[in-house]
Image (spheres, rainbow, N blue to C red):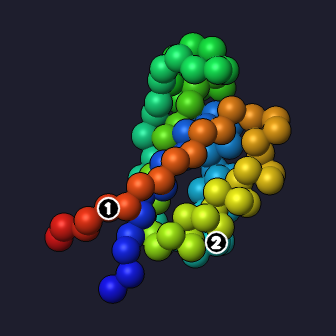
Amino acid sequence: MSQKHLLVIITETVLEDTVIDEILKLGAKGFTATDARGLGTHGMRAGRWSVGGNVRIEVVGDEDLCERIVASLTAKYDADYGLLMYSCPVNLRN
């Protein structure tokens, strides 16, 4: 069994459906999406699921899947949208 990774994507809610479509097309079997708020380089984000909010999308997959998702989203959206992504190895428990 290969090591699984948790990829966390934090971006503007306007990209939510687009990002979800993209990660599923790239091979993700599922995802979790929640509202997100905080302060960062793009300023204060209220996280009220409105035009000005952020969404946090989590994907569990192998390292290759996570790298493909990061590369694709970075190439398409990083220049024009707030986009933060990070990953770490995880131990899955059933």
Q: Quadrant of residue 78?
A: top right
Question: Gap in Å between the C-alphas at discs 1 and 2?
Answer: 20 Å
Query: Considering depth in this image, is 72 or 63 the residue closer to the camera?
Result: 63
Image location (x, y in percent) of residue 32: 42, 53
Q: Quadrant of the C terminus?
A: bottom left
Camera sees residue 25: yes
Residue linked to disc 1:
90
At 61% from the left and 64% from the top, the residue drawn is 67
At 65% from the left and 38% from the top, the residue drawn is 83
Earlier sequence position, callout 1 versus callout 2: 2
Image location (x, y in percent) of residue 45: 56, 19
Q: Residue furthest left?
A: 94
Image location (x, y in percent) of residue 77: 77, 45
Image location (x, y in percent) of residue 92: 25, 67
Camera sees residue 21: no
Asked if residue 42 is positioned above or below residue 92 in the image, the reply reads above
Q: In the visual, does 39 lie left or right of 21?
A: left
The amino acid type, in three-letter code, at marker 1 is Val
Residue linked to disc 2:
26
Q: In the visual, does 37 lie left or right of 24?
A: left
| Crowding at mark 2 (Cα within 10 Å: few <14, some 14-19, many 20+) | some
| Crowding at mark 1 (Cα within 10 Å: few <14, some 14-19, many 20+) | few
Q: Quadrant of the N terminus?
A: bottom left
Q: Which mark is residue 36?
A: none
Q: In the visual, does 64 lie left or right of 74?
A: left
The amino acid type, in three-letter code, at marker 2 is Leu
At 60% from the left and 39% from the top, the residue drawn is 84
Instruction: Tell us which disc is closer to us: 1 or 2.
Output: 1
Q: Residue furthest bottom?
A: 1
Q: Quadrant of residue 42?
A: top right
